Every structure is written in structure tokens, then in C-alpha cells.
Image: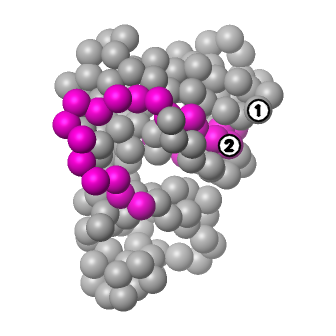
Amino acid sequence: MKMLDFFKDAGAQVLGAMPGSDAAGKLIKHVKDSGVMEGVLDGEVKVEFDAAAGEVKVSGAAATQEQREKIVLALGNVRGVAKVVDTMQVQKPQAEASHYTVKAGETLSKIAKTVYGDASKYQKIFEANKPLLRDVNKIYPGQVLRIPT
């Protein structure tokens, strides 16, 4: 089991002001709409949401470690989610990427300079976060990104 913390007040507006009993359904729809569940059959990934705690529990199976990480990030980078508890299994295990939380005023180039020592490697971070990121200039404070080794 792995837990990843997120900024509860940052992210996509998926749940609305008062998350109801359909919150888990909205979250799984958001993940599907993000494009990271390609090849995952309906029902293979299950989501539970505790609105009071802002905690998502995700279980099931992902094809790769990368897909698993992107599913967790799609769930966590949602306004109202503070933590994702991940118990998913991976069909093709790989090394885990690290994560980075965007700070105010940062760009992918600044993040690449921080983590790789080379600002020109921003494209590596962008590619590692597709399709969650669609534009290299559209990141926000509090967003959690995958950082490949």
C-alpha cells in the first residue's frame, strides 16, 4: 500500500462544492476522461472516496507502473482530495518515478533545473505526465507531477 499526499484546495474541479454519494463515480469518470486508463477494462480499477477526510482509496490493476502512477495523480490532483491510498497491482512492474509538488511561480523548466540540473530537460517531465498535462505552460501550484529517473 502506498499513500501520496496532495493539496486539498488545488486541482481540477470535479467533485463540486458538496461531494455526494456519487463522488467516487465522478472521480473514476475524471480518470477515464484524462486518458490514462487506456487498456483498463471497466471495473478493473475501483475508487472509494471519504469526503470528510478528503481521502481516495484506489484498488484494482494497472498494466504498468507508469499507468498506476498516472491514475493516482489524476485522482489526487482534484480539488477536495488530500490523500490517495493506492493498493493497485501492476501487471508489468517497473521502477517507480518520484513526485514533485509544483510551487508558485515555477515552470517545467525551473522544475527540470531543480531535479535534473538542466532546464532543457523540461520535455522529459512533460512527456512523463502526458496525457495529464496537455500544455507545457499549464501547471499550477500544488499540482503533483511524475518525475522520471
- What residue is pinned by disc 2? 82
Determine whether, in the image, residue 119 is placed left or right of residue 100. left
Q: Tell me: residue 45, above or below residue 127.
A: above
Q: Position of residue 139 (x, y in %)?
A: 48, 62
Res 21 quadrant in image? top right
37 relative to 88 in the view: left or right: left
Give the residue furthest to the right. 52
Image position, residue 98 (x, y; %): 42, 61
Which residue in the protein does label 1 denote?
A: 53
**Residue 31: horizontal and vertical position, in percent?**
42, 31
Does residue 21 show up? yes
- Above or below residue 96? Residue 17 is above
Marks 1 & 2, CB-CB < 8 Å contact: yes
Question: What residue is shown at x 62% (from left), y 13% (from top)?
Answer: 22
Nearer to us in this view, 63 or 25: 63
* Residue stretch in magenta: 74-98
* Residue at 26% in and 15% down: 41
Instruction: Inspect the magenta stretch and tell me whether residue 83 lies in it.
Output: yes
